Image (tube, rainbow, N blue to C red):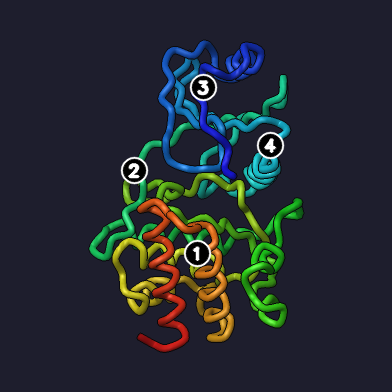
Amino acid sequence: MPPSRIPYGDLPKKVRYEVEQCTGEVHHVKSVEAGFNSSVAAFILAAGGKYFVKALPSDHRWVWTQAAEAAVAPFVRSIAPTLLARIVTDGWDVLIFEAIAGHEADYAPDSGDLRPVVDLLIRLGGIPCPDVTLREAPLRLQHYAAPDELHHFAGSCLLHTDLNSANVIVADGRARMVDWGWATRGAAWLDAAYWTIWLVSAGHSPAEAESWAHRIPGWRTATSAGLTAFAAANARMWNEIAGAEPDAWTRRMVVAADRWSVYRTSGV
């Protein structure tokens, strides 16, 4: 299960003290509702400026996402907010980032944000995968794809893998990517493929979504069999996540993943 959200002010006093050693005295806090990977997610206005703080209990089963994000951060500065500090104290693992201006990307068919997102994924494709501990794409998908399909997902490229529009911030026609906790090593085309599902969810037909993904060079390295296997795997994954009574947001993702999978197998 995702971690339960708590306000920044509910962090232990010692943790907040350590945060203020980096930011200066905190004057105002605004919690963020989007996202599922953190117990604390908040923008803070402090003496030193504006920051974004995310935190997980040190014993949470997802705390590895904090370590992954910290490991990747130095290598993605050109397309992501700067990580200023990682604090592990008093039972908490905390990341402090610069706060960046902009709006959540709009993936709708008529949106002006689509081209900046294409450019963002092209730039990500040009970043060499760092020699740090990352999840491997075939292992992440092994429960949703057949064993003889997993080779399609293997590769040596750095991937973000969570193309939720809330994780893409656009300002002045340029997009940046936040929340790297699920950074993964795998095939060059996978991030474009993950984006395809989000585009369908936002109102694109599967063909239109693939047309946008095709603008990303990594996508063009995929085989038809690989894309079809990936689409089917994600349909299975989203149906598992949804369970018997999904909320509206999750249901929309299930429908999108199913539509793309059907399109990949039947062309409709």
- Given residues 264 and 22, the one toward you in this image is 264
Mark positioned earlier in the residue sequence (2 or 1): 2
Question: Residue 92: image x %, image y %?
Answer: 67, 26
Mark positioned earlier in the residue sequence (1 or 4): 4
Residue type at mark 2 is His
- Residue bearing mark 1: 239
Question: Residue 77: image x %, image y %?
Answer: 57, 45
Which picture quadrant has residue 12? top right
* Residue 260 vertical position relative to residue 41 in the rendered view, above or below: below
Which mark is in front, 2 or 3? 3
Mark positioned earlier in the residue sequence (4 or 3): 3
Q: CA distance from mark 3 to mark 1?
A: 33 Å
Left or right, 136 with respect to 204, comes to right
- Residue bearing mark 4: 60
Residue at 62% x, 53% y: name it. Answer: 183
Residue type at mark 3 is Tyr
* Residue 34 vertical position relative to residue 194 in the rendered view, above or below: above
Residue count near mark 1 (Cα–Cα under 10 Å), binned few <14, some 14–19, many ≥20: some
SS at badge 1: helix
Residue count near mark 3 (Cα–Cα under 10 Å), binned few <14, some 14–19, many ≥20: many
Which mark is in front, 3 or 1? 1
In the picture, which quadrant includes the C terminus? Answer: bottom left
Which mark is in front, 4 or 2? 4
